[in-house]
Every structure is written in C-alpha cells, then in structure tokens.
Image (cartoon, grey):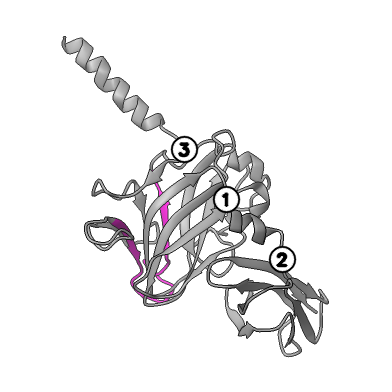
Amino acid sequence: MKRTLLLFSLSLIFSTVSAQVVLNQVDDFEDGTTKNWSDPSGTGTENISNNGPGGDGDNYLRDYTNGNGAGSGSKLIIRNNGNQWSGNFIAEGVQSITLNVRALTNTINVRLSINGSGGKFSTTNAVTVAPADEWVLAEFPITPSDWTAVSDGIDGGAAGTDINATLTNVTQFRILSNPVPSWIGEAIDAEMHLDNITASGSLSVNDFTKQDVEFSISPNPAKSKLNIVMPSGSEEMNLEVFDVLGKRVHKGTITQLSSSVNVSNWKSGVYLVKVSDGKTTQTKRFIKQ
C-alpha cells in the first residue's frame, strides 16, 4: 500500500514538473497563488483577492516598481518560473495570448517576450494602457511575423536568430512594459495588474481585419520631414515616436489620413513610429539621416 502511494505521489510530482503550455490554458489566480509568476527586477508579485476584472471576489496578480530611477526594483516586468508557459506553442495551436491588464500611476506599454532555442524575441506591437480603474482586454498575436529579435546586453549576448525555433521550444515567458521591443522592462514608477492570461487558438475577427490595414511612412530614410499616411476609414489615432533607447521624442494625434512631422532637429539614427487607437497598436521602423 505504501509503495502504491509513493508511486502515485511521484507520478503527480513528475506530471506537475513536466507540464507545458496547452491550448486554452488560463492563469486566473483564483487559487490565491502567483501561478509561478515573479518579478526578476527585485520587487515582488502578489495575489490580490478582490477587484479583478470580475469585480468583488475576483483575484488578480499585482506587479509594481519602487520608483528608484534605474536601480533594483525599478523595472516593470514579470516572468513565469513554472513550466505552464514553456514548450511548443506552434504544435499546441496557440496563435495568440489574451489577458486582462490594468495600469496605475503611469501609462504602460505591455509586451510579451520569450526565450527559447532560437534566442530572445519580443512582440513588435505593444498594448498601451493608461492609468485608470478600468481593466483592458489585451490580445497579442504570436505568429512568427509578430515578433522582433531582442538582446538585453546583460545575460544573453546576441539577439534572437530564429523565431520559429523559439516558438517550438519556449524556455522562458515574460510580460513587461516597454515602449520598444525588449527583454527588459522599462524603469518606471507604475503598477501592472494582470488576470486571465490565456493561450488562445485564434485572433478575434476585428484583429484579423486590422492586421490587413496598416499605416505607411515616407520617405524612409528622411532628413527633414516624416510623412504618415493612414488607411481610409481610420479614426483619430495617437502618434508616438521613440529612439532606440526607449526615449519618447514625439507625441501627437493624427486626425487626417495624411500628416507630417518635422524631424529636421532629430539626431541621425533609428526610431520606432507607433500609432495606436487605445486598443490596437502598429509600429514601424524609421531612419533619420
């Protein structure tokens, strides 16, 4: 009898350790734990038992920074230390990750970042969440074309080289805030609340439609003027431009199908042009000569 119980216990331990990502899995934090999510920057994550997206009695995960400039605990980022977000996302049919997110104190730019056999990658497009009491439903398509190779310059050397190899063998999964694709969260004084992190099998119809309609920029490279052309039928959009260090150099609103930005005083280099309607975001690379 004791041997039977021992074997049963060992089988449970093994199945828990070897568990990997499966389609439609959800981290809803209703068990009162952090589901193996932790903050590698130095601050802790905690399970909050009330005021999630479902209201009273709905648990969620809280991550926060301490506001210490660029020191320990200043970066907004969490990573999963378990196995439920590792493995072969392609074979399991996972095409997108959805989650509920809320920001406090400052606006955050939420991204996913992964490491695996092909190196480190971060989602090209972020979901921008302004500080408010309301929860936002964020959806990240994770097909190979939705990622940008990144390197942290600290613990991993060169940027990723093969997104397909990484998606078939993910070894670490992160959720972070950064204006640009990154392996590291930005240094910011903010809180990020998360719930219902879900491995989904398809994108919403609206997202499929919006992926086929992109804005364009010209000329690229440019010396004095950056022209931005929006698709027909576009509503008012928010425009932000960031340098390679993640510093925002321009912020404005696009209310016409065609608009221009004077870049003559910008330093030569690479910039990221981000256009967002508060729900979806598109980012393009721009070179200032």
Q: Vertical placement of 106 versus 116: above or below?
A: below
Where does the C terminus fall, quadrant-wise? bottom right
Query: Given the image, on which type of amino acid does mark 3 rest?
Result: Val
Residue 136 locus on image (x, y percent) = 43, 65
Q: Which residue is mark 2?
A: 214
Q: Amino acid at mark 1?
A: Leu
The image quarter in which residue 244 lies: bottom right
- Asked if labels 2 and 3 touch by Cβ distance under 8 angstroms, the answer is no
Magenta region = 60-81
* N-terminal label among 1 and 2: 1
Q: Position of residue 30 (x, y in %)?
A: 27, 48
- In the picture, measured across the screen, residue 119 lies left or right of residue 186, that is right
The residue beneath circle 1 is 203
Q: Is residue 166 left or right of residue 87?
A: right
Where is residue 17 shown, x and y percent of the image?
Answer: 37, 31
Q: Residue at x 41, y 59 (%)?
A: 100
Q: Which residue is mark 3?
A: 21
Q: Determine whether, in the image, residue 106 is placed left or right of residue 248.
A: left
Q: Nearer the viewer, mark 3 or mark 1?
A: 1
Q: Between disc 3 and disc 2, whose residue precedes?
A: 3
